[in-house]
Image (cartoon, rainbow, N blue to C red):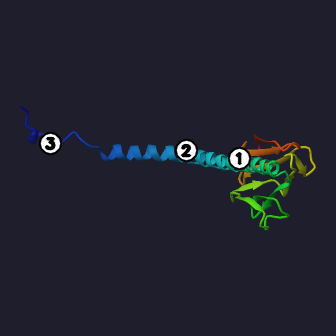
Amino acid sequence: MENTRNRPFSCAGLTLIELMVTIAVVAIIATVAVPGFNQFLQQHRTSNQAMQLFHSVQYARTEAIRQNSPVRLSAHNAGWCVHTGASCTDVTVLREFSAASQLQSSTFTGMTFDGRGRRTSPATNDLQIRFQPKTCKGSAASLVSINPLGHPTITKGTCL
């Protein structure tokens, strides 16, 4: 049987140098990973906001068909709302959505759907709404397009 009292040092644990090397490696990895993670978060927020508008368009169109009367989707308080009256301040608001503060969207004032679900205003062929982070790099933009029949689509785009 071996006597452990005669050993000068135990073999368990980390030395100070090993601990410092490990901390330095973790710091280098974190320095490289954080900017990429921030860009990932911005892209996620952008696509999430575009998806929320996409669902809002579908909701407004569905309500117009269900009620067989015009329903409007309007810009309101840095977001948008779905309503049947003249504005978002009326008691005819069906649902209200808020936009994220770090996003920019193209000039969007509103659109109207008739009782058949068709987009009646604005009178352009395809209405396109762009969402992108304020500090946009690369292809972080999301585009929501609504055709004259009222069908929305989402595509990825480049920043402007």
Mark 1 neighbour density, 10 Å: few (under 14) some (14–19) many (20 or more): some
Which one is earlier in the sequence, the residue at label 2 or at label 3?
3
| Helix, strand or loop at mark 1 | helix
- Which residue is at a point 76% across and 59% down the rendered structure image? 81
- Which residue is at a point 60% across and 49% down the rendered structure image? 38
Q: Do the residues labelled 2 and 3 touch (CB within 8 Å)?
A: no
Which one is earlier in the sequence, the residue at label 1 or at label 2?
2
Q: Distance between the residues labelled 1 and 2?
A: 27 Å
Side of 28 relative to 118 (left or right): left
Side of 10 relative to 147 (left or right): left
The amino acid sitting under disc 3 is: Pro
Q: Quadrant of the image for the N terminus? A: top left
Q: How far apart are marks 2 and 3 (CA)?
A: 42 Å
- Which residue is at a point 74% across and 59% down the rendered structure image? 94
Side of 105 relative to 126 (left or right): left
Outermost residue on the front side: it is: 67
| Helix, strand or loop at mark 3 | loop
- Front residue of 87/94: it is 94
The amino acid sitting under disc 2 is: Ala
The amino acid sitting under disc 1 is: Met
Q: Mark 1 points at which residue?
A: 51
Mark 2 neighbour density, 10 Å: few (under 14) some (14–19) many (20 or more): few
Residue 51 placement (x, y as % from top left): 71, 46
Foreground mark, 2 or 3? 2
Residue 115 placement (x, y as % from top left): 86, 49
Q: Are marks 1 and 3 in contact (CB under 8 Å)?
A: no
| Helix, strand or loop at mark 2 | helix
- Front residue of 16/69: it is 69
Q: Mark 2 points at which residue?
A: 33
Residue 145 placement (x, y as % from top left): 82, 44
Q: Mark 3 points at which residue?
A: 8
